[in-house]
Image (cartoon, coloured by chain):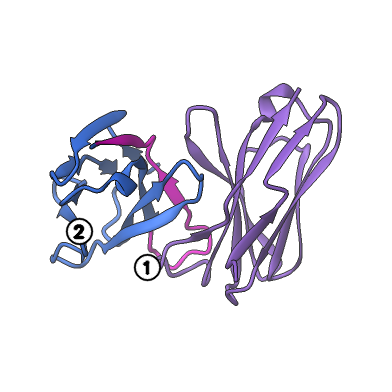
């Protein structure tokens, strides 16, 4: 039973399209994250939600909009996709936003390719 | 701002040998956590080992151990008896612990480990 599941695993789309990536965790964690891994494998945080509330919003274009309908779900919607958005997007969760000891549990990533 | 540096983009080790991956970090905080994550070709991020900064004792998990030097801000990963399945990208990561809700995991640039049979 997958702890953090993302769909889809692969997404190929044309420039200018709008797409969404979904994430669900069944760990009972309070906090969820979106990370972007670029072509050089560098991982950088984009957003964090704690109990449906946005708590971290890094410098990310407005075209990216996260939504958390409940604490088990965090979706990422991207408008007007650009070539530079091509990357692997990881969803992750942690028990809460405050205690860092346990680290994160990651999903398997969504490889987005914009053509 | 905190930064994490992995100075070895690639490393190679013979099967059954030992290899050490380097990581240094920059912080002015005294309480924090350090992690090593493994990313095999499957892309999955797997937690290998973690260390609390307030603990003097180095963490160990089976064949994996760390050398944590707080004063030097160094956190290296040692893999003993290397196996083919250890081949992966390894990321060092830092997370501050100050009771704030905006703590986040900050990653290094990764070290790609190849294991030769």
Local packing at callout 2 (Cα closer than 10 Å; few below 14, some 14-19, many 20+) is few
Decide if residue B99 is in sight here.
Answer: yes
- Residue A71 horizontal side relative to residue B72, left or right: right
The foreground one among B90 and B63 is B63
> Which residue is rendered at x = 64% and y = 60% of the image?
A5
Of residues B116 and A40, the one nearer the viewer is: B116
Element at label 2: loop
Element type at marker 1? loop
The image shows residue A64, relative to residue B68, as above or below, that is above
Instruction: Tell me the magenta residue range.
Output: B96-116
The colour of chain B is blue
Evaluate if marks 1 and 2 touch, with contact meaning CB atoms under 8 Å apart: no
User: Residue A11: which quarter of the image?
Assistant: top right
Query: Mark 2 — residue?
Result: B63
Question: Quadrant of the image for the N terminus of chain B?
Answer: top left
In the rendering, at what x and y percent does residue A15 appear? 82, 24
Residue A67: x %, y % from top left = 77, 57
From this viewpoint, which residue is outermost toward the right? A17
The tint chain A carries is purple
Q: Report how far apart the C-alphas of labels 1 and 2 lie in the structure.
A: 21 Å
Residue A101 image label: 1
**Which chain does the residue under circle 2 lie in?**
B
């Amino acid at each position: 039973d997958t702890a953090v599941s993302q769909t889809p695993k692969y997404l190929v789309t044309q420039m200018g399209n709008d797409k969404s990536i979904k994430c669900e965790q069944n760990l009972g964690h309070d906090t969820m994250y979106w990370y972007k891994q670029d072509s050089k494998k560098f991982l950088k945080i984009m957003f964090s939600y704690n109990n449906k509330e946005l708590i971290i919003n890094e410098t990310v274009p407005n075209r990216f909009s996260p939504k958390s309908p409940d604490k088990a779900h965090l979706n990422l919607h991207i408008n007007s996709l650009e070539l530079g958005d091509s990357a692997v997007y990881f969803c992750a969760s942690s028990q809460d936003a405050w205690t860092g000891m346990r680290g994160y549990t990651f999903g398997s990533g969504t490889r987005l390719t914009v053509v | 701002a905190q930064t994490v540096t992995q100075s070895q983009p690639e490393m190679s080790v013979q099967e059954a040998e030992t290899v050490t991956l380097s990581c240094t970090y920059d912080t002015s905080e005294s309480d924090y956590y350090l992690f090593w994550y493994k990313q095999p070709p499957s892309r999955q991020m797997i937690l290998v080992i973690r260390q609390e900064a307030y603990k003097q004792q180095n963490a160990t998990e089976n064949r994996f151990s760390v050398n944590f030097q707080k004063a030097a801000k160094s956190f290296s990963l040692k893999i003993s008896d290397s196996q083919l399945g250890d081949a992966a990208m390894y990321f060092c990561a830092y997370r501050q612990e100050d009771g704030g809700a905006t703590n986040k995991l900050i990653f290094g640039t990764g070290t790609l480990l190849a294991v030769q049979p």
